[in-house]
Amino acid sequence: SNFVLRRKKRYCPEDIVLIAISNWQAECAMASSVFSGKQITVIPNGVNRREFFPVPKNLAREALGLPKDKKILLVGAQHIQDPYKGFPLFLQALEYIEPGEKTIVFFGRSRGKTIEVKGFDHVYLGFLRDAISMRLAYSAADVFVAPSVEEAFGKTLVESMACGTPVVAFDATGPKDIVEHLESGYLAKPFDPRDLAAGINWVLEDKDRTVGLSKSSVFRASEHYDIEMIAKRHIDLYKRIYEK
């Protein structure tokens, strides 16, 4: 490991410019012995607003065969049981949530063909391979829960917000840049399942609040994460480096 570290330092250009996709990632780079003192710019990932936009909730639920008379909690990732995605913390949070008229919907790769959740109605959509099915899943939900414990960015959060579904996540790593606490969702104390549950309940308990959070989510996604705006920031950075 020491040999690899010295090799990295030897080949790293003095005038290199690094792009981090979150402030947390930039902090990690600045704290490293390889990139300490280098120029680091934060430019987040973007979302294609022509692919991710709100679909009427009833229409989305009908297309996916989901109940229309229940509150839907959506949880998903490329690999749900990836240790970094915090799925066990979500299961712990459910202990502080009344099942009532709620259904949990999962998407993503899983080790098994089904996902067991005690006490809650739940649906597993499997791995969603295209933007249309993803857009329907986000739009069908009342809240998207992202319990990740380590996330370089958190693109699913932005996709959900672009579809008008507020997000509950931990106030740490990449997601803390994305969600405005109590404006476009809820940022729970890291990594407290009880506060994660409090955030979920807070989003769902007031219909008018949920509508307001939905509008704020769409606005934030379009104003801060639209791919055309993100592309322009990359172009501007390249121009500044080239001119210098």
Image: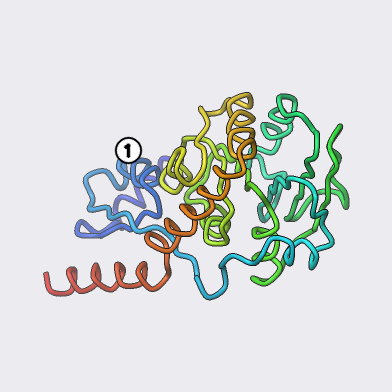
Q: Amino acid at mark 1?
A: Ala
| Vertical order, 187 against 160 (above or below) | above
Return the x and y of residue 40 as percentages of the image width and height: 27, 52
Q: Nearer the viewer, residue 212 or 232?
A: 212
Return the x and y of residue 97 as percentages of the image width and height: 72, 29
Residue 156 is left or right of residue 128, and the answer is: left
Residue 137 placement: quadrant? bottom right
Residue 68 is left or right of residue 10, and the answer is: right
What's the residue at 49%, 66% (across, down)?
47
Residue 189 is left or right of residue 134, and the answer is: left
Q: Coloring scheme of the render? A: rainbow
Q: Nearer the viewer, residue 83 or 135?
A: 135
| Vertical order, 225 against 30 (above or below) | below
Q: Which quarter of the rendered picture does the C terminus lie within?
A: bottom left
Residue 110 is left or right of residue 3, and the answer is: right
Return the x and y of residue 102 as percentages of the image width and height: 78, 41
Return the x and y of residue 130 as percentages of the image width and height: 68, 71
What's the residue at 57%, 44% (across, down)?
208
Q: Nearer the viewer, residue 161 or 75?
A: 161
What's the residue at 55%, 60% (across, down)?
159
Can you identify the residue that label 1 sits on?
31
